[in-house]
Image: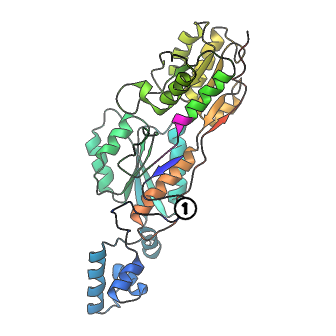
Amino acid sequence: MFVTGHTSFGGPAEPSRGQRRAASIRDVAKAAGVSYQTVSRVINDQPSVRDETRRRVQEAISDLGFRRNATAFALASGVTRSISVLTSNTVLYGYAATLQGLEEASRAAGYALGVRVLTPEDDLDRAVAAAVDSGGGIVVIGFDQIGAAALDRVPADVPCAAVVEAPSPGHKPDRPAVWADDREAARAATEYLLALGHETVHYVAIPASTGTRRSARPRAEGWRQALKAAGVTAPAPSGKGWDARAGYEAGRKLARNRDVTAILCGNDDLALGVLRALHHEGRRVPQDVSVIGFDGAPHSEFLTPSLTTVRLDFPGLGRAAFELLRAQLDTDRHDFAPVPADPELVLRESSGEREA
């Protein structure tokens, strides 16, 4: 799992080069020559502060660009702070589990969480503007084209964090973001299938988050890299959606090709459809065809055969994204962001050595 933005691992959060650390309430107190309790009374508009003292504190706040701690203000005032989540899906496992992590983290911190589901028919500019107008900050789940487009439309001065697919090597998102290294995970899954004796591995792809090329997604790139390293020409990826129906349609075509002995799927829902298609065509799993899914959805363990899959820590990604946003809203926080678990290849019954 990787994070970029206002946090680091193994030490205090460091500002990027040329960027000043956000001022804390104690910085304001020092600049104004007062106690931090006095600063708190000023920012909470309490009357028991002399006019001259209030003026010095307000000048220090302005000079330092201080923003008050949202959580502390909520506790003191009883006013609930909120964040808005923009996502195009709440049903597929990766989206739902990411939302679960966001909800858990925001509730524990005293924030209310609102979810806006984006559709292809929405005017994204208006949808993003409505989220901005609701106040607080914004988290974008940018696993797909709609989410990625919404993230691009969030104004630069609005506190924002995102959960995205792994960017290309050497590139980072423009906004604070968190992602899992599914490129490396797909490469490892493909290598595992090749090591079992399969001559090649076919791929049922999830849609691209940018453009239209399914082969440009990190999981597709990892799959292709493993095949290239093994001296194998990658077959054309198949698949036209996210769900089990799309997996079934792709799986029927693959199942009819007796040269197909190993299939990597872009998510577990696709794998579910592929397994059903193989069964309908009389192909045994894993004796005739090995199948690996992606994401680690809970139901994958209880399929027949149980599904080998790449498990991703989506709840952890959600919690980490919330902390990236919270660091922008609560500028005197210096806590470490939680670190989601690394992707893990979970071996089950759907993969095995190729039979002669």
Number of numbered tags placed on the structure image? 1
Q: Quadrant of residue 126?
A: top left
Is the residue 37 above or below the residue 250 in the image?
Answer: below
Where residue 30 appears, as percent x and y from the top left, is 38, 85
Q: Quadrant of residue 108?
A: bottom right
Assess disc 1: are there few (<14), some (14-19) or many (≥20) residues with their C-alpha within 10 Å of its C-alpha.
few
Residue at the (63%, 14%) spot, across then down: 261
Residue type highlighted by circle 1: Ala
Element marked by disc 1 = helix
Where residue 2 appears, as percent x and y from the top left, is 51, 47
Q: Which residue range is magenta in the image?
A: 178-184
Q: Is residue 41 magenta?
A: no
Quadrant (top left, top right, bottom left, bottom right) of the C terminus:
top right
Where residue 86 appears, as percent x and y from the top left, is 39, 45
Asked if residue 355 lies left or right of residue 108, the reply is: right
Which residue does the numbered mark 1 point to in the structure image?
108
Where residue 110 appears, as percent x and y from the top left, is 49, 64
In depth, the one of 200 and 272 nearer the eye is: 200
Asked if residue 287 lies left or right of residue 33, the reply is: right
Task: Say if residue 92 shows up in the picture.
Answer: no
Residue at the (72%, 15%) spot, across then down: 287
Residue at the (41%, 42%) spot, across then down: 170
Q: Quadrant of residue 157?
A: bottom left
